[in-house]
Image (tube, helix red, strand yellow):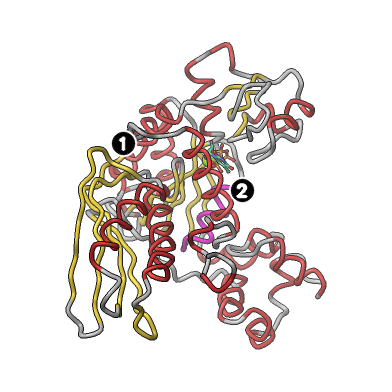
Amino acid sequence: MATIMHVDMDSFFAAVEQRDNPELRGKPVIVGGTRDSKRGVVSTCSYEARKYGVHSAMPIAQAVKLCPHGIFIPGDHKKYAAVSGQIRSVFYRFSPVVEIVSIDEAFLDMTGCEHLYGSLEDLGRAIKEQIYETVSLTASVGIGPNKFIAKLASDYRKPDGLVVVRPEEVWDWLAQFPVKKVWGIGQKTAEILASWQIYTIADLRRCRRETLVERFGKYGDTLYQLARGIDPRPVEPESETKSLGRETTFETDISALPKLRQVLAELSAEVGYRLRRHGLWARTITVKLRYHDFTTITRSASLPEPVNNDDDIFSTACQLLVKNAGSRPVRLLGIYVSQLTSFGQASLFSDPRREELARVMDELNTRHGRRVIYKGRQLPLDSGGK
Ligand code: TTP
Ligand code: MG
């Protein structure tokens, strides 16, 4: 049986602000924009502000109404990224198998290391203490037999929580949760389930596997398993990432440049999303082309500064594409980024509005667990994207 630990910092950006300015402690602190910022959204807020109903992704203007005496701060992403780096270094003291999920959150595979600690509770306390000693911030920790349980557990007693769920406790402990807590269930799926009178995981267990598969396809099977506390997803370390990329093979070869550009835009967006999710920047962009006769070429360009914005990735890749495609039919198109660095500074030509747009798009896409917002250039040409 595996032992997975999930660590998530408490009100991360707001907690960093409270740490660095004692006057803010114990007060409702809202990070994301100044009080008068017209179009800002809340990145996060302190637990004191949550009592008023303020939460992440809410327009600042609404937060001002709910919490007029709140302290509104634009935020300092570079500082948060630096703190995140310090926290990561603590994770690696505990396990080499660390999956960084976001700026303040990670899974650690502790399987086989349990005996190094008196108990799983001791393990959880140890990592919380070491994080606190390193960055003077509290984290919530969940420990369970898989990722799904570990993440639910870290959320269960937030802030400053520590929850251990042993394999034999999973069945009963899980039953209470609303279906919304199940990985992958969004508003829409929850509504469908509600129309079947299914509100909790206990309710969900009454659903036959066949019924779920019939309604939700392959995900129905996942749902069936998650409801029973089964989650085979491994912890996927990506700390050693030297390069990352995406490629696609076409069903029929493509010669038309506009079509290839559209696919490249889509691939660039996926690669950009993955870079940003891992707090990485890339200096080298590579385009891979396999022609109809299987000859394969890669062409790279190195940039003066590391980038992780879709626009930068796409424009560089597109230049490489244009030089090498358009005449011969293409079987496969791929894009890779390499020379990766963590926490690169925003590029020289960076436009804060563009960074903000990327952040908002990423948030929406992450929240929905799938792509819900696109740039026009990614749209298929036959659906009006010409
Ligand atoms: P979360 O871990 O989701 O939130 P949190 O750490 O602020 O609070 P909690 O105690 O509930 O874990 O996100 C981590 C950071 O990511 C958060 O401090 C700010 C940023 N963030 C945004 O900028 N926008 C968002 O919509 C969310 C959810 C987070
Ligand atoms: Mg957090």
Residue at numbered disc 2: 156
Whether residue 60 is situated above or below residue 156 in the rendered picture: above
State the separation of the CA atoms marked 1 and 2.
Answer: 34 Å
Viewer-proximal residue, 102 or 234?
Answer: 102
- In magenta, the rendered stretch is 146-156
* Up-down relation of residue 358 to residue 289 (above or below): above
Relative image position of residue 241 (x, y in whole percent): 26, 54
Question: Relative to the observer, which residue lies in front, 250 or 261?
Answer: 261
x 59%, y 30%: residue: 32
Ligand 1: image quarter? top right
> Which residue carries the number 1 mark?
344
- Residue 329's place in the image compared with 101, above or below, is below
Any mark on residue 23, and which? Answer: none
* Drawn side of residue 139 relative to residue 308, left or right: right
Q: Quadrant of residue 300?
A: bottom left
Residue at the (49%, 69%) spot, across then down: 231
Q: Main secondary structure of the magenta part?
A: helix
Question: Residue 157, percent across and down?
Answer: 61, 43
Note whether ligand 1 is within 8 Å of mark 1.
no
